Amino acid sequence: MRTTRRDLLRIGALAAASAALPSWAPIARAARPLRILILGGTGFTGPFQVQYALARGHQVTLFNRGKRPSPEWPGEVEQLHGDRETGDLSALKGRTWDVCIDNPTSLPSWVRDAAQVLAGNVGHYLFISTISVYADGSRPGIDEDAPLAQYRGKDAMAETRQTLIADMENLYGPLKALSEAEAFRQFGKAVTIVRPGYIVGPRDETDRFTYWPHRVAQGGEMLVPGDGKDPIQVIDGRDLGEWMIRLAENRTFGTFNACGPRDTLTMDAMLEASRKATGGQPRFTYVDSAFVEEKQIELPIWVPRNEGPYGGYGQVSNARAVAAGLIFRPLETTIADLMDWFGKLPAERQAKLRAGISREREAELLAAWHQRGTRTGRA
């Protein structure tokens, strides 16, 4: 089974233990301290935003339901509680901030409701969207001006978290697109839309990317889809979170695809980075996409280039984001930090990955591939 838009649905909605501030680059104080409101803040990327904002000297307020344990922050963070699903935003009334970062919203009604309290009280609204908003994911080079997915339901403002979850495949992209439109409608030109694809690194509880370096570290014969040349795009959650704070500092408005790395990353290059970072010595056996489809092999992140409705997902244009200051730490650093974080999780959690295939299933598939008499294997 190929990776589909469904694989992108839970990118920013998972909690995990706090990760340390990155050491790959020094963090200087910002020229002007900001009052930053973060809606959410305790999921995947939110803590990186908080940590970086504090290191830059900003004042941070979080607004969420308070149902997830907050990490140990390296500074003072104000915590406000409410529930956007029920419309309880009373804790935000009568307050002003320089900027609001909206992390968890997938419903246009949530943007509308937030604006009823915040419009006129925040100077800049940053919204995390997704590349799933694009109507056609099949072509390479998708840029921010490409047509967006259309909502086919009866009333987008009546959609709820429950109706969204019940039909993610058809509703997620269109409702995100309408949420973007609602942001501009409510907050005017002082809006920044950030559209990431796969977010990876420490705190990623999905295991979609983790599967690959984890499997490389185990060694032995390893099944790899495609020919190694299929492009892959991932962004470290720290690079995403920190860049959003810099966008706020610079009052950078507009829409940006937050896909990385800067240059093309192939499957082979990702596997080689995993080998260097983990020390694993696998023997790669490449199987074609027809075999993957026939055997319904569920392998995350990978999509065959220029095949199927999502064949362009590894080749989304990030030129506008790079021009706006998005930078990427080395992939080997991301992998090493990810595996260090993953290795500190409970043993029972490490024993059962949430994505990819088991070693038993992999062995069966490799045996079936070899029985075909096809030439395979590259070390």
Image: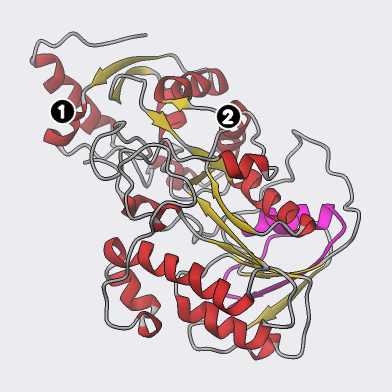
Q: Residue at x 38, y 39 (%)?
A: 301
Image quarter of the C terminus: top left
The quarter of the picture where residue 255 lies is bottom right
Give the labeled residue for mark 1.
291
Local SS, label 2: helix
Q: Residue furthest left?
A: 372
Which sits in the foreground, 39 or 183?
A: 183
Earlier sequence position, callout 1 versus callout 2? 1
The kind of residue on which mark 1 rests is Phe
Res 201 visible: no
Image quarter of the N terminus: top left
Which sits in the foreground, 191 or 196?
A: 191
Q: Is residue 6 left or right of residue 66?
A: left
Q: Position of residue 320 (x, y in %)?
A: 59, 44
Give the labeled residue for mark 2.
331
Colour scheme of the rendered structure: secondary structure
Magenta segment, which residues?
Answer: 46-73
Q: Position of residue 196 (x, y in %)?
A: 51, 50
